[in-house]
Each structure stands twice: as structure tokens, then as C-alpha cells.
Image (tube, rainbow, N blue to C red):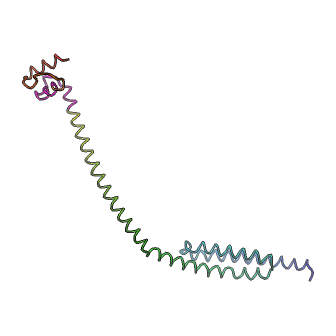
Amino acid sequence: MNVQTQIEETREQFEETAEQAREAAVSFRQTLRTFASDTGYAALGGADELIGNMRSLARAVFSFPGDAIKATTRAPERAIVRFEELASRGRGLSKEILGGEGTKTARRRTGNARRQAKAAMTSVGRAAKAGAEAAREVVEQVGEAETASHLTYEERTVDDLQQLAGERNVEGRSSMRKEELIEALRAQR
């Protein structure tokens, strides 16, 4: 057999190997879909396994075509077995993590924090309600005072006039009658 014939046979084997690899990849993709519920745990491991197999295949193609064919035909089976192993390991780790003391402690602390936050929100709500009530009272008092300031002296009570006279430092205001308070306040303008 001459070199040219050997090269041609190697090329044909390589093309067959490539076709088998494509078919294997399609089959593997369908198998991965079947294991969709475990993908989160095993996809990374399966991809790593596939990459490793493809690297081995590439090395085998350049070293010897027969090894490439063997590696290609076994790759899907090995990948499926590895995928199932990784999925099983992932499920075990998940159970271990969820049942661990650290997870229980975290759940308990989360519950406590949630209750404390709810209590704080209740306190904030009560404070806001009390603040709104106080503001409403202030507005009412300011409204009354503003209304009182627009009244004529004659329309005001003696108590209002005495308070106003106190603000303006009118001497003797406590003993003055209404008319006297009005006269003293008008004199100060």
C-alpha cells in the first residue's frame, strides 16, 4: 500500500468518524434533554466530560485513525454514565446542604429577621399614624389661630384679648375689661 492510498483511507476513516461524532452528539443532546431535571447538577460535569472526549478524539485523530473511531463510539455511553453519576452526586449534595445545621440556622435566622422586620413596620405604621394625627391637630389649631387673627377686637373674647395684650406687653391687662383691652391694643398700633 502506497502513502497516497493510506492517506486516502485515513481521510475516509476520518470523515466516517466525524459523521459518527455528529450522530453521537445529536444522540447525546437528546439524552441530555431526557435528564433535564438533573441538568443543574450534571450539565457542567457532562460538558467537561464531552470536552475531554473531544480533546482525546482530536489527539487520536492525529495519532491513529483506529483509536479515533473507538473513542468516538464510546464517548456517548461514557458521557451518559458520567452524567448520571454527576446528577446522583448533585442530588446527594443538595440533600446534605438542605438538611445541614447551617441551613437550619439560616432558615431560623431568616424567620427571626422577618418577624423583627414585621414588628418594626408595625411600629413605623403606628408612629406615622400618630404623627399624622398630631399634624392634623396642629393644622386645626393654626387654622383656629389664623381665623382668630382675622377677627375684629370686638368679635374676640376677653381671654383672646388678654392673650394678645400679653404678647404686646400691655401693662395692667389682667384687671382690664374688654373695652379697656380693645382701647389699649388700638393705642399700641
Position of the C terminus by quadrant: top left
Q: Residue at x 22, y 30 (%)?
A: 146
Which quadrant of the structure image shows residue 32? bottom right
Vertical relation: 187 (above or below) 18: above
**Side of 30 relative to 152 (left or right):** right
In the image, 172 versus 60, the foreground residue is: 172
Residue 163 screen position, x and y as percent: 15, 28
Q: Is residue 54 above or below residue 74?
A: above
Answer above or below: position of 138 versus 50.
Answer: above
The quadrant in which the N terminus is found is bottom right
Residue displayed at 9% across by 26% down: 174
Identify the residue at the far right of this view: 2
Residue 18 in the image, given as x and y percentages of width and height: 76, 75
Identify the residue at horizontal 40%, vertical 72% (top origin).
104
**Would residue 79 be counted in the magenta stretch?**
no
Looking at the rendering, the stretch of residues picked out in magenta corresponds to: 145-165
Count the marks: 0
Q: Quadrant of residue 139?
A: top left
Pinpoint residue 187: horizontal percent, then vertical percent: 16, 16
Q: Is residue 142 left or right of residue 35?
A: left
Q: Is residue 83 left or right of residue 167?
A: right
Specify the quadrant of the image occupied by residue 77: bottom right
Q: Position of residue 70 (x, y in %)?
A: 74, 83
Helix, strand or loop for the magenta stretch, by majority? helix
The residue shown at (25%, 47%) is: 130
